[in-house]
Amino acid sequence: GENVEQHPSTLSVQEGDSAVIKCTYSDSASNYFPWYKQELGKRPQLIIDIRSNVGEKKDQRIAVTLNKTAKHFSLHITETQPEDSAVYFCAASRNNAGNMLTFGGGTRLMVKP
Amino acid sequence: DADVTQTPRNRITKTGKRIMLECSQTKGHDRMYWYRQDPGLGLRLIYYSFDVKDINKGEISDGYSVSRQAQAKFSLSLESAIPNQTALYFCATSDPREGRDGYTFGSGTRLTVV
């Protein structure tokens, strides 16, 4: 089955700096890669996703890049703000698995004011 | 939003007790999932169901069972709870139709087994 590894497990940045979280996956048939943000005490919520036919996707201060050859994808947050502090999860799935997701271990991002 | 509702929100139970966690959804999704969250281990799949007649084991199903009572309801049971089942449990739903990937999570159930 699919295995998703996520690094780093914790990340501390100064407000205004950029943050990058990286994930690798094992199943070359995976073609959908979402990112979830989980604020303290709350449920994970989808913030951005990318499909394998696209190399990069942006939404305001967040972007995701995908390298299918190397089987890794990354989340980039620019101009970080204290409200970006949360746990971030990457995930991967194959369409023929019915979009069942395999998650990475999570990254705790702390943005210091 | 209350489109995926989990009950209870918090529960403390004793070792050996049977406990049921419930999940109901108003999104009309056929697919439902139970995940367990432990610090540093991310979200691990316990069971999933693609429709009312379909139940499948996930990565860590030992010690758990499920029931899909209706399209909208998916319950997780611990037949004899043990302390290492202390965790945060999430139910999720999804719609596999093209362009609608991604989960909707419930608010979670924090379970403590003492």
Image (cartoon, coloured by chain):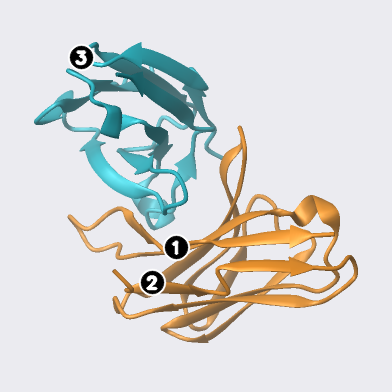
Chain colours: A cyan, B orange
Name the residue: 41% across, 83% down: B72
**Circle 2 is placed at which residue position?**
B4
Kindly indicate whether the residue at mark 1 contacts the one at mark 3 (C-beta within 8 angstroms).
no
Does residue B112 sit above or below A88 in this rendering?
below
- Residue visible at 18% across and 28% down in the picture: A62
Q: Which residue is mark 3?
A: A16
The amino acid pointed to by label 3 is Gly
Q: How far across and down, in percent of the image, does residue B94 sit?
A: 35, 63
State the residue lying farthest toward the front.
A113
The quarter of the rendered structure image containing the N terminus of chain B is bottom left
Mark 2 residue crowding within 10 angstroms, few (<14) / some (14–19) / many (20+): many
Disc 1: host chain: B
Location of residue A42 in the rendering, given as x and y in whole percent from the top left corner: 42, 52
Residue at 34% over, 21% down: A111
Between B91 and B33, the one lying in front of the other is: B91
- Give residue B42's quadrant in the image: top right
Label 1 amino acid?
Ser
Q: Nearer the viewer, mark 3 or mark 1?
A: 3
- Asked whether disc 1 touches disc 2, contact meaning CB atoms under 8 Å apart, the reply is yes
For the residues labelled 1 and 2, the Cα–Cα distance comes to 8 Å
Q: In the rendered view, would you say A101 is above or below A52?
A: below
| SS category of the residue bearing label 3 | loop
Residue B107 numbered mark, or none: 1
Residue A61 screen position, x and y as percent = 14, 26
**Disc 1 secondary structure class:** loop
Q: Which chain contains the residue that carries disc 3?
A: A
Same subunit: marks 1 and 2:
yes
User: Looking at this rendering, what residue extends furthest in the left direction?
Assistant: A60
Residue occupying image coordinates x 45% and y 68%: B32
Instruction: Say whether mark 2 and mark 3 are on the same chain.
Output: no
Asked whether B81 or B61 is in front, the reply is B81
